[in-house]
Image (cartoon, rainbow, N blue to C red):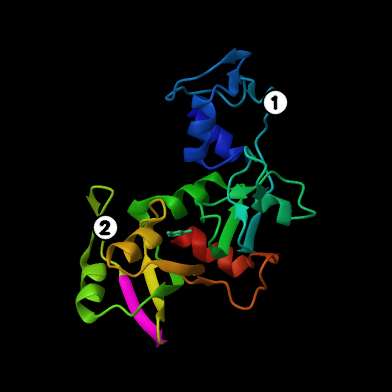
Amino acid sequence: MRLQKYMAKCGIASRRKSEEIILEGRVKVNDIVVKELGMTINPKKDIVKVDNEIIKLEENKIYIMLNKPKGYVTTVKDKHSEKIVLDLINGVKERIYPVGRLDVDTTGLLLLTNDGDLAYKLTHPSYEIPKKYIALVKGIPNNKKLYKFRKGLKIDGRMTAEAYIKILKRNRDTSLLEISIHEGRNRQVRKMCKYIGHPVIQLERVAIGKLELGNLGIGEWRYLTSKEIEYLKKL
Ligand code: URA
């Protein structure tokens, strides 16, 4: 098994994040530091350590939905003494990690799990799982801008995939938009809104696929129901 996949299955972090941890030189296989990607290990024989602690396969799969408040980062380790989302999850002994990321200032639906396969599926763009956001933006986009947003914009040198956007409410100087994208590039919604000249003032993620935040309060979390887990696995 690939080292980063094994790490994800042990509940260390997503596969992608585990790759970063490897590149940071924090992983040892049989007491030798591995700093390159591509290594495969035998889970039955090899001893893998992260930050000098032996990691083990997590049997008990955990799936949690959090309504992330502003001011919390979606990393597993706090490098710059910032508040991390895991601080909000009390009473769970398994090692879990956030699925994908939300910016520090974004609120809303964040999944946390130790199921590496599911985390991979939910974050990989090829699965095209829509993520729905409610954005308060400056000004009111006209039809031409909405059309551009839907069809694709050049962000960081690459076109975005087709997206959904609808005006929910027009205020005097701002508007409330419903946006749905399925790529999940870094700060994508903020960049897209800025591109069409309507920078984001507030951003909340309200759904991942059919999974909805509902009335979960800010900073609160709950376990997913078995129906929700089944739905995600079938995606
Ligand atoms: N897009 C953003 O710009 N920020 C987020 O947190 C999520 C999507």
Q: Amino acid at mark 2?
A: Thr
Q: Determine the residue positioned at 26% across, 57% down.
A: 160
**Residue 179 image offset from top left, x and y in percent:** 38, 72
Query: Which residue is found at the position 59% from the left and 77% from the top?
Result: 214
Whether 218 is drawn above or below 110: the answer is below
Disc number lying in front (2 or 1): 2
Q: Ligand 1 is located in which of the four quadrants?
A: bottom left
Query: What number is the disc on residue 160?
Result: 2
The quadrant of the image that shows the C terminus is bottom left
The reply to whether residue 10 is in sight is yes
- The vertical placement of 161 against 83, above or below, is below
Report x, y in % for residue 161. 26, 60
Quarter occupied by residue 9:
top right
Highlighted magenta segment, given as a residue range: 164-171
Chief secondary structure of the magenta portion = strand
Q: Residues within 10 Å of mark 1 (few under 14, many from 20)?
A: few
Q: Position of residue 78 (x, y in %)?
A: 65, 41
Mark 1: which amino acid?
Ile
Using a 10 Å C-alpha cutoff, classify the residue at mark 2 as few (fewer than 14 neighbours), some (14 to 19) or many (20 or more). many
Q: Secondary structure at mark 1?
A: strand
Q: Which residue is mark 1?
A: 54
Mark 2, secondary structure of its residue:
loop
Numbered tag placed on residue 224 in the rendering: none
CB of mark 1 near ligand 1 (< 8 Å): no
Magenta stretch: residue 168 in it? yes
